Image: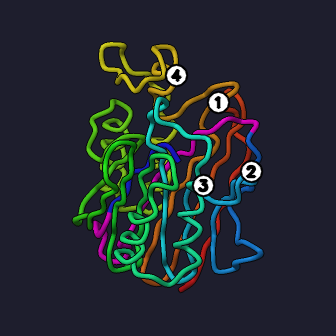
Amino acid sequence: MCLIVLGWKQQPDCPLIVAANRDEFHRRPTAALDFWPDAPQVLAGRDLQSGGSWMGVSRGGRFAALTNYRDPSAQRADTRSRGELVAGFLTGRQTADAYARQTCNEAGAYNGFNLLLCDGDTLVWVGHRHGADAQWRVLDDGIHALSNHLPGTPWPKLLRARDGFAAALALTDAAARQEALFDTLRDDTPAADADLPDTGVGLDWERRLSPVFIAGEDYGTRSSTVLTLCRSRIDVEERSYGPGGRADGRRPIAIDR
């Protein structure tokens, strides 16, 4: 996952609303959103190369999502798959803060990441990057936006996504809100060169990665997901995309709680 915006306790009956894009190389094998045969309580997409996931939810209302921390100079080839951190929380029973503490203790086994965890009562961020101790904190009620850097980093794509998310959240009609969230995730407006960050990937890649939605031929937005976790129901819809941003199907799934 490369961009996540979520509203925590902003709606009285739906404490968690999430809009997220997964950006990845199109050649990487992936299973679409579904219940896992080996863990039927988990609803998530799956990375078929390493077996983990970038975002998912359980029937009981546990939620986890992951973004990579972009720092190519610090990447190691001998690390474990970061996607297993999402899978571990969704298949487990630990509270979000207990899992966060455990993850911090084991963070050195992974390349840099941001991890979001919600157990229904608490929303937690866990962060790990090269050269710094892993850290975690409980997130306050509100709207939070996260990409491939520290929380609150004002990348143009993140500011656009956060503004679009806030406008969508203000809509009272659920169907209109859903489409507005997907419209926000489909924003392919590039950032001006003067506003681009320098994350060590070079100017061409900074330009390619600057929109909320990346319509690349080899690398781009593979899926957009909107998740609404309410007290009586969980609704998740994943919209998939192929090379060039070509729409490649929709998968809406609902869970009664």
Residue carrying label 3:
80
Q: Are marks 3 and 1 in contact (CB under 8 Å)?
A: no
Residue carrying label 1:
219
Is label 2 or label 4 in front?
A: 2
Q: Earlier in the sequence, mark 3 or mark 1?
A: 3
Q: x, y percentage for residue 34?
A: 70, 66
Q: x, y percentage for residue 33?
A: 68, 60
Residue range in magenta is 8-27
Q: Residue at x 50, y 62 (%)?
A: 227
Q: Quadrant of residue 124?
A: bottom left
Residue carrying label 2:
49
Q: Are marks 1 and 4 in contact (CB under 8 Å)?
A: yes
Is label 3 or label 4 in front?
A: 3
Q: Nearer the viewer, residue 127 or 15?
A: 127
User: Callout 2, which amino acid?
Assistant: Gln
User: Callout 4, which amino acid?
Assistant: Arg
Residue 143 lies within the magenta run: no
Residue carrying label 4:
208
